[in-house]
Image (cartoon, rainbow, N blue to C red):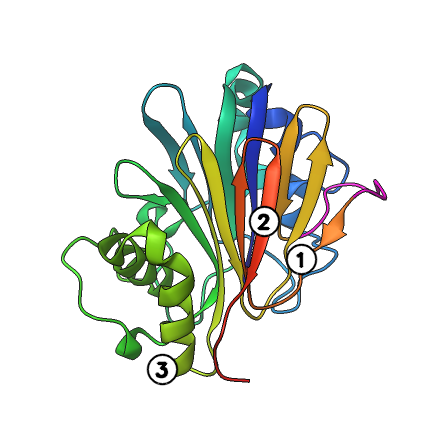
Amino acid sequence: MCRHLGWLGAPVPVSALVLDPPSGLLVQSYSPRRQKHGTINADGWGVGFFDGGVRRWRSDKPLWGDASFASVAPALRSDCFVAAVRSATVGMPIEPSASAPFSDGTWLLSHNGIVDRAVLPASATAESTVDSAVLAAHIFERGMGALGDTVARVGTRDPGARLNILAANGSSLLATTWGDTLFSLHRDDGIVLASEPYDDDPSWRDIPDRHLVEVTGTNLTLTPLEGPS
């Protein structure tokens, strides 16, 4: 339903990972190569990064049509960021606040998937009424330290849910695989987590389904997530 990417490493321009690669998020907004659900991601986009605080730029327009972002993105440098392009769940509103990444002021979080809002508690802090925003609020309220447990619990309540989460706090990345793809790339200057590879580098690694991913420094660890088969 979406494509997302996270970076942790040396400061790099946002454009270098989002716009410039031959199959980066810009291309994935209109021609994803590994997307299991949906064929296009034209219902908005967002980028969040850290420069001593949390900064976000979100839109309800297709990424390919935003010339202003394309002109500014090379000047946006960060050692940690999350970016996403959106394919809206049927019936959900298309508005800037519905585009990831969502934030609690400390973390940036993107959701690639779908979830029945009926299995989630009501939240006064959700940034939008869309399923991803309500899920993000629930995750923030339970705490990022419980991310794996939260995803497993929600997956148990909604067996049809797809719950690929990608989050960052400036010094680490957290992610889950639950029903959709996620890949990692170890570069000399950092680590990328992405819904699909942005190029054909053979170093990309497929992360197995139903796992919690933790990236700190140059280390990436995987922990299986328990839940319904």
Q: Quadrant of residue 190?
A: top right
Does residue 134 sit above or below 121 in this rendering? above
Does residue 117 sit above or below 213 in this rendering? below
Q: Nearer the viewer, residue 217 or 23?
A: 217
Give the magenta-colored segment's residue range.
Answer: 196-203
Residue 50 located left or right of residue 192: left
- Label disc, if present, on residue 162 of the rendered structure: none
* Amino acid beneath label 1: Ile
Q: Earlier in the sequence, mark 2 or mark 1?
A: 1
Q: Quadrant of residue 218?
A: top right
Q: Nearer the viewer, mark 3 or mark 2?
A: 2
Q: Which residue is mark 1?
A: 207
Which quadrant would the C terminus be assigned to in this image? bottom right
Q: Earlier in the sequence, mark 3 or mark 1?
A: 3
In the rendered image, residue 121, in percent from the top left (x then y), is placed at 21, 70
Mark 1 closeness class: few <14, some 14–19, many ≥20 residues within 10 Å: some
Q: Which residue is mark 2?
A: 221
- Label disc, if present, on residue 157 of the rendered structure: 3
Measuring 72% from the left and 31% from the top, which residue is drawn there? 187
In the rendered image, residue 205, in percent from the top left (x then y), is placed at 75, 50
Q: Is residue 18 magenta?
A: no
